[in-house]
Image (tube, rainbow, N blue to C red):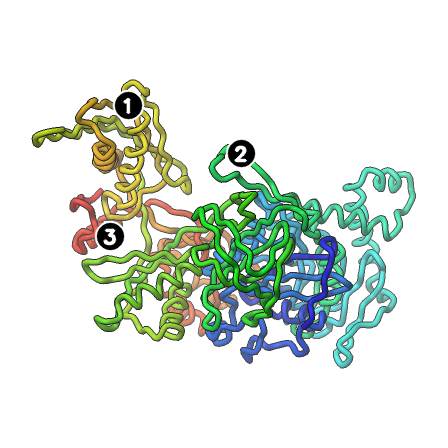
Amino acid sequence: MARKEAPLHNVRIIGIFAHVDAGKTTTSEAILYHTGRIHRTGSIDEGSTQLDWMDQERERGITIMSAATACHWQDHRINLIDTPGHIDFTAEVVRSIRVIDGAVMVLCAVGGVEPQTESVWMHTGEGRRLPRIIFVNKMDRIGADFDRVLSDIHTRLTPNAYPIQLPIGSEDDFVGVVDLLKEQALIWDDESDSFSVESVPESMKNQVAVAREELIDAICETDDDLLMRRLEGEEPGLDELQAAFRKAVVSSTLVPVLCGAARHRVGIQPLLDAVVAYLPSPIERPPVQGLVPGKEDEVTERANAFDEPFCASAFKIVTDPHVGHLTWVRVFSGKFETGERLYNPRTDETERVGRIYRMHGNEREQVEHMAASDVVALVGPKSTTTGDTLCDPEHPIVLEDFDFPDPVISVALKAPSNGQGEKLRQAIRRLCNEDPTLISQYDAETEEQTLSGMGELHLEIAIDRLRREFGLAPKSSAPQVSYRETVRQPAEYEMIYKKQSGGHGHYAKILLRIEPLESGSGVIFENEASGADLPRDFVGPIETGVREALENGVIAGYPVTDVQVTVLDGDYHEVDSAAMDFQIAGSMAAREVVRRARPALLEPVMRIDVNVMEEHLGNVVADVGRRRGNVNSMNVRGHLRNIDGEVPLSEARGYATDLRSLTQGRGTFTLEFRRYDVVPDTIADTVIKERIEEGKVPNRAGGL
């Protein structure tokens, strides 16, 4: 398809987000159909969608990898990123959020606000303040209830969401929508795949009048001039209302709510109109900010413009079987031609870009240049990883890195034969380069490769990819929980490291304090020792030793987290002290101070969201309790009953099979990491004993 050039104010860069099975990919396909990008919408059930192209996606009917494409509507170019709805593939969502200018949140008219909806809403709101549109999909399904979903949105997402449409009917009677601002009914015709504009149905006129007044009130409250005129009895014009509404949406003050049924392509044209009318262009978003390499205190920025120095963020790495290493980038500023070189501040290297591709799912269209607002894939950069900045060598900048969640579950993989060990390690390394939430470690003694991820499905897909894409069938252990360690009280310890073996000796003395922090704090290192007692040259090695010791754990060999370690005092010898002495002392002192601070084992606690029929509710609630879980609330979702609770991940393994048994195969659930919590001592002792027997504990430390 020939590219239609669009000025920056006519570009929209959006992400499509939803919980599993809300109809996100179907909505994306319908958008591509109505914009002429494709001529036939694919089917999730038939595995024929354009954007879910992986074998695993088509077999399972879920999105696993984000997919990028571009289409055109009303002289606007829309760069669209379709993202996964399953919580195990959070990395795809996190990195997509960083490179878009607006979001379309797809909600199911039956399920309403679901766990992944809340998670994405938080990610798009905190710090980013992305403008958002909500599309209530599946209005044609049994149990669809627009008013209930709207109430759910106001309670769980934002009170500032206002419908700009009302559905005409629901379930089998859903035939169209009423545009509140224009006071028009849009009635769909399945045969012509279009709609006719008609008068508002008589039965809805009162409802429309009330909803329209509420919408206009909300818009006018964001504009002092319109508000004053409205208080004086003057009705603002349609163009004025739409202009003020756009300003409010772009500033994230208000959120428009639309509705439709994507599988029948109902409501998609008005959704596209809303994307163009209300979501921002790149030039309406703030300039991206970053640091000047080598000057960590100097902040610089790049405006979204063609005439700024080139700046792009590498947000995704893919190994393509035909072209090799592909680096997906969002270009924020400047222009760039094929064959030129880009600077990567992290590696301090310049790399030549050999080819530039515009992506449509897994299809590629080669182009010769890229510029501000483009989302493209590059061939050439080899050392670039997710989160790297690529920029003009003469005007370097480092954009903020991505913040991905830590893995919570792992498996041990072993090559099926002696000659395939290195091949397995290389294949796993490629998967980890593509997905930052896959973490791998190699144990040379056991020749096992530990692969950690966000959930059982995440690891299952990774192992399946090893089989299909790399021709490997590794032996794998049962999934294991990724525990952590922490401390429950402050403690101090003085370490004197002293050795004399002829010639220069070894001497280092430090006093460490450790104290617990709130969950999610990680490890914080501070130095309060005076420079006279402990020269600054030795503080860095102490920190290195401390962090190395904490990374390997003390009681069970798991990383220590949520602690602050402070150097209170120290001493050195002018001849016998060296940096390595203080690194060793820091490591030894860290292990000992943890043992004195009532160490504890932490386990990942998951939010569990279960949908079941009412007759199975009691059995499922009881089963959650047997798993050391808690039920926080029970709600009605259409004809289903919803259980919102928490359960330790160690007790949730194999839950899919058990839930099928309890609900005759009709129950569904999602697990989402919530926090780490202290493991009960009796269970912790068992875990520690098993780790000691496996030889995973440094210095064979004892129990709690």
Give the quadrant of residue 487: top left
Earlier-in-chain disc, 2 versus 3: 2
The residue located at (75%, 64%) in the rendering is 270
Q: Amino acid at mark 1?
A: Leu
| Location of residue 276 with respect to 21 vertically, above or below | above
Which residue position is annotated with label 1? 534
Earlier-in-chain disc, 3 versus 1: 1
Which residue position is annotated with label 3? 687
Badge 2 crowding class, 10 Å Cα cut-off, few under 14, some 14 to 19, many 20 or more, is: few
Q: Which quadrant: the N terminus?
A: bottom right
The residue located at (51%, 75%) in the rendering is 58
Which residue position is annotated with label 2? 298
Q: What secondary structure is found at the residue carrying circle 1?
A: loop
Badge 3 crowding class, 10 Å Cα cut-off, few under 14, some 14 to 19, many 20 or more, is: some
Q: What secondary structure is found at the residue carrying circle 3?
A: helix
Give the Cα separation between the discs numbered 3 and 1.
Answer: 39 Å
Left or right of 39 in this view: 614: left
Residue 369 visible in rendering: yes
Do callouts 3 and 1 mark residues in contact (Cβ within 8 Å)?
no
Give the quadrant of residue 35: bottom right
Front in this rendered view, residue 148 or 331: 331
Task: Locate residue 301, reporting x and y percent.
Answer: 60, 41
Give the Cα separation between the discs numbered 2 and 1.
Answer: 29 Å
Residue 24 visible in rendering: no
Task: Locate residue 514, reporting x and y percent.
Answer: 30, 32
Front in this rendered view, residue 499 or 258: 499
Badge 1 crowding class, 10 Å Cα cut-off, few under 14, some 14 to 19, many 20 or more, is: many
Q: What secondary structure is found at the residue carrying circle 2?
A: strand
Task: Locate residue 137, reporting x and y percent.
Answer: 65, 65
Q: Amino acid at mark 3?
A: Val
Left or right of 306 in this view: 660: left
